Image (cartoon, grey):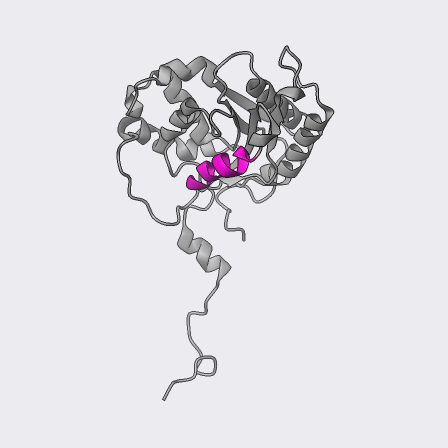
Amino acid sequence: MSITQNFTNQPNPAIPLNIVAVSGGLNTPSKTESLVQNIVDELAQATPINVHFIKLSEIGPLLSGAIYRNQLPERVQNDLAAIEAADALIVGTPVYRASFTGLFKHLFDFVEQTALVDVPVLLAASGGSDRHALVLEHQLRPLFSFFQAQTLPIGVYATDKDFTPEYTVSSQQLRDRIVLAVARALPILEWAPAKGQRAQAIKEKSAQANQQLGINKQVEQAEILPSVAVPDLSSAEARLHPQTTQSSPKNHPSVA
């Protein structure tokens, strides 16, 4: 019996994955939006997906000045709820001053901090040159590690030379990287234990966050967070390390 038995025990390709794509680019059109869209399109060719695309170029001004989540307009609260309920995330940001954009970080400051445990995240970024390629490892991966999300093994980094002046992908090398990232992600995504079922399971957390979450409020949490897929850690531990109910003197000799 699987420790994820509350959800599906077998991958069901007929159930679409709920994918939330986030672009941290502040302009539209932009290289980052194009990059994220190309990753989404490649994934859509490989498996059924439903996509909710969040663009900071559209909602960025709506975040300004908010300290508490209940200060945000309904559109942004709905976007945050979509992030929290996603089966997987595809996130991309341009590189500003060697990191992600401030509004990208501000958006994720409002995400309920236990909602993304075990959620697969495909990382992407665009920058002016190859010098910023490690932003995936030094900035984005640590951010989602804080959420105890499952950052996928292959990220995608693109530079200005990979795009046409109209922001379409022109580089075959970048296309190949996108194909590789999606190919490596698929086995994880298709076996996502909460596939298609996270929305209902996470609904209460999102509602509480809308009322209580503030970016300047300290939150106490356990060192290891239970995921939506494996809500009972003691049950999971028992399955991983079964113990007999009666100890045998032969197996446990007394100590004089």
Where residue 132 sits, quadrant-wise, is top right
Quadrant of the frame with the C terminus: bottom left
Q: Main secondary structure of the magenta part?
A: helix
Placement of 164 over or under 101, stated as above or below: above
State the residue in front, 174 or 213.
174
Residue at the (51%, 26%) spot, across then down: 95
Can residue 219 be seen from the camera position used here? yes
Q: Does 244 appear in magenta?
A: no
Residue 255 is left or right of residue 169, and the answer is: left
Where residue 14 sits, quadrant-wise, is top right
Q: Position of residue 201 (x, y in %)?
A: 42, 35
Q: Position of residue 137 (x, y in %)?
A: 53, 38
State the residue in front, 245 or 75.
75
Q: Position of residue 31 (x, y in %)?
A: 58, 18
Residue 195 is left or right of residue 186, and the answer is: left
Residue 161 is left or right of residue 140, and the answer is: right
Placement of 14 over or under 78, stated as above or below: below
State the residue in front, 60 or 114.
60
Count of numbered badges drawn on the protein: 0
Residue projecting furthest to the right: 172
Where residue 181 sits, quadrant-wise, is top right
Instruction: Please provide the residue range marked out in magenta.
Output: 134-147
Q: Position of residue 6 (x, y in %)?
A: 48, 44
State the residue in front, 44 or 234.
44
Residue projecting furthest to the bottom: 256
Can residue 195 be seen from the camera position used here? no
Placement of 67 over or under 202, stated as above or below: above
Residue at the (66%, 20%) spot, across then down: 161
Residue at the (47%, 30%) spot, across then down: 99
